[in-house]
Amino acid sequence: MYQLVKDFFNGLWNENPTFRMIIGMCPTLAVTTAAMNGIAMGLATTFVLMFSSLLISLLRNFIPAKVRIPCYIIVIATFVTVVDLFMAGYFPAMYKILGLYIPLIVVNCIIMARAEAFASKVTPLRAIADALGMGIGFTWAITLIGAVRELMGSGTLFGYHVLSENATHWVIMLLPPGAFLTMGILLGIMNVITRKNVRDTQCH
Amino acid sequence: MNQYARMIVVLLIFSVLSGAVLGFSYEIANPKIQEQAKKDLEASIKNVLPGITKYEQVEKEGITFYIGLDDQGNKKGIAFKATGQGFGGPIEMMVGYDPKEGKLTGLQILSMSETPGLGARIKEPAFTEQFKGKSVNDPFIPKKDVQVITGATISPAGVASGIKSALEKVTKIYPVGGDY
Amino acid sequence: MKELFFIIAGSVLVNNFVLSRFLGECPFLGVSRKLETAVSMGIATTFVLTMTSVATYFIQFYILEPFGLSRFLQIVSFILVIASLVQLVEMVILKTSPALYKALGIYLPLITTNCAVLGLALLIAIKRYNLIQSVAFGLGAGIGFTLAMALMAGIREEMEFADIPEALQGAAIVLITAGLLSMAFLGFSGLIPM
């Protein structure tokens, strides 16, 4: 039990995929023009992460080591397509905004990295705890980035006006440079809080 | 079982299961996706042709027209799609046209990739409302006939020229004052 | 001809894959410490991108669409094709040119998980490019990626000697630099009718 709690909290802070590991940057930077987009992208990724981790952990003794990567790819791509189809059918407005970046969850390094480094080595329960922690860790991080960009770029938060009508909108925050700048500065703030520097990305 | 046979069998099982799951999900989700697309189309037609309750789809000279009808079945106007060249890519829009009056009845931007906060404001009613009631013979010159958005002139100009070039074709098929 | 030029220039400058479409961020942030390795990575990726554009063109328009499979088998088939293609390219380079393999070899397996490759395949399907346009798009995407990698690596090599506040050292300053680069590329927007 203690182990499960530890696995779960690991992704929230200590090994947060966005701020500590710096992986899965494509969706992090691309869709975060509003806080709500961050939540939607985060939940979609969490769904894929949980189910693929569970399946890979369950089948870890069945998959031959040599073909494990193609097997993981098939599993992940299948769940991503399921998310893609159901999102298009049931959440069309959000689907239009996230567009291309839903299919691109397949190549989000977080999922492959957790499958290879964690889910394929532990029991299904631990794999789920880890996937849930990583997924929620990813979700809060990109929602925070989205909130900062939305607040500065359009003066709203989750679509509600919070700044006065006269506040200057920093359009640059909604454009590509705003994504890089927000992420860089937030990372700097995280470094101050944790007093540990992220020297480089853990992508590869 | 030898090692290679096992690898092939495992991969085969994965592929077949994946195909089955996807086929099944598609069967469930596809009707919903189609329904959504239809709903979106209907909403945009009703938006640009105020007061209609149903519409008929007509194909003429390669263009799809949606003829709007009210409760009594009276023709209230024609909606059609137009494309303009914006700053970040094509701008797709739905235009409402009333041949009886020779006027536009509404405009809705369907899809575009303009700059958020600047060009993307062509989506806002503050911009689209100005086309309501505009004569189809209007020259549609930006800054003169068409109000532009501060900091973005290319996107509104794209909308204006998109409407104008579409109207040139449409008014030949459904001339002003003619029957439809 | 003019159209092909627009596609290439558009994907190199206006809609640069890395700096404005946010595709291929991982290698851009992770493998950009040295100019030489960054350029090697860029060339290897360009190679794979161009091959992918041809392969996915045929799969999308000659297999998936005629049989009505596009909506639900597209993602699975594209990613599997990309993974096999990367393996194939790796084997071919190893057999034909050991020197080239030594230079690019270690980067090749990483390219499978580069968003730029799958992103390119999906964009070709969305934009409905023909074969030549697809190749031009793949090539342009690769050149744009290499350009961004080279610029970033060049700046990072100089930055080694800069006095950077402690909290911003490492990935944070790289991201801020990327933001400034992206701002510079913003100047190209609207240059070409897309």
Image (cartoon, coloured by chain):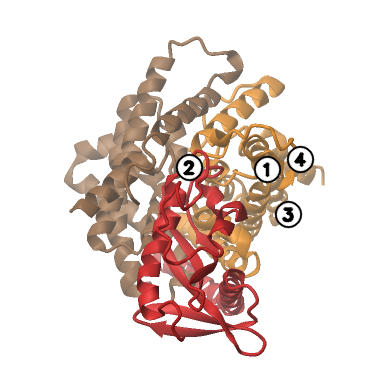
Chain colours: A orange, B red, C brown
Would residue C30 be visible to someone looking at this image? no
- The reply to whether callout 4 and callout 1 are in contact (CB within 8 Å) is no
The spot of residue B61 in percent (x, y) is 34, 81
Identify the mark at residue A143; answer none if there is no mark: 1
**Mark 2: amino acid:** Ala
Q: Earlier in the sequence, mark 4 or mark 1?
A: 4
Badge 2: chain ID: B
Q: Is residue C74 visible?
A: yes
Q: Which residue was labeled with disc 2?
A: B152
Name the secondary structure under disc 4.
Answer: helix
At mark 3, the secondary structure is: helix
Q: In this rendering, is residue C41 above or below B160? A: above
Frontmost of labels 4 and 2 is: 2
Indicate the amino acid at tag 1.
Thr
Crowd band around label 3 with a 10 angstrom C-alpha radius: few (<14), some (14–19), many (20+): some
**In the image, is B117 to the left or to the right of A90?**
left
Q: Can you give x and y, in whole percent of width and height, for residue C60 in the image?
A: 36, 68
Tell me the residue that label 4 is attached to: A6
Question: Marks 4 and 1: same chain?
Answer: yes
* Looking at the image, residue A181 lies above or below residue A82: above
Which mark is first along the chain, 4 or 3? 4
Q: Are marks 4 and 2 on the same chain?
A: no
